[in-house]
Amino acid sequence: MTKHEHLRQLVMQWEEAARSAHEAAKRFAEALAEVIQPVVPELEYHVGADAISLYCDKFAYVPSIVEEPLVNWLEWLFPFDCTCVEAPRGIWLGAEEMEKLKKVLEDEWEG
């Protein structure tokens, strides 16, 4: 095998891995949105090259002291280093929404 053929083979493997990773990210984003949307129906997401971005204009504002960012909840749900999910504009949930979301997630997680 020539160096050119070897490089071509490596590029093809890399492209296939990237497609596979993107498809897995899309499936994860869809499943995550499906769990969150009963509490935050306006939730939207975008699957990028290295992260899933969550958006919700209704909950994207400067928080008050009783609100908690959705990403804190994600850290609770995924205690491992989950840097692949972000909320660039912020998604701030009040105590009521956070409790509903925790209940939905606990039910899903254990169900």
Image: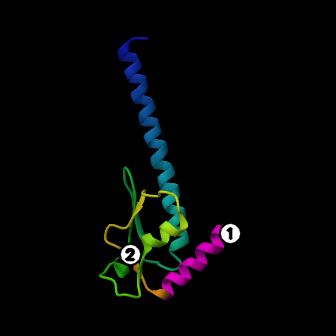
Give the residue at x 47% y 78%.
41
The C terminus: image quadrant: bottom right
26 magenta-colored:
no
Give the residue at x 38% y 75%.
91
The answer to whether 81 appears left or right of 108 in the picture is left
Dot 2 lies on which element? Answer: loop
Instruction: Name which residue type carries label 2.
Output: Ile
Residue 53, percent across and down? 38, 62
The quarter of the displayed image where residue 55 is located: bottom left
Residue under numbered circle 2: 91
Residue under numbered circle 1: 110
Q: Mark 1 packing: few (<14 Cα in 10 Å), some, or many (20+)?
A: few
Dot 1 lies on which element? Answer: helix
Residue 1, percent across and down? 44, 11
The coloring applied to the image is rainbow
The number of discs equals 2
Residue 42, percent across and down? 42, 77
Give the residue at x 52% y 65%.
32
Instruction: Name which residue type carries label 1.
Output: Glu
* Magenta-colored span: 96-111
Residue 98, percent across and down? 50, 81
Give the residue at x 52% y 58%.
80
Q: Mark 2 packing: few (<14 Cα in 10 Å), some, or many (20+)?
A: many
Between the residue at mark 1 and the residue at mark 2, the CA separation in whole angstroms equals 25 Å
Residue 78 disc label: none
- Mark positioned earlier in the residue sequence (1 or 2): 2
User: Which of 23 and 95 lies nearest the eye of the viewer?
Assistant: 95
106 magenta-colored:
yes
Q: Is residue 82 above or below residue 7?
A: below
The quarter of the displayed image where residue 93 is located: bottom left
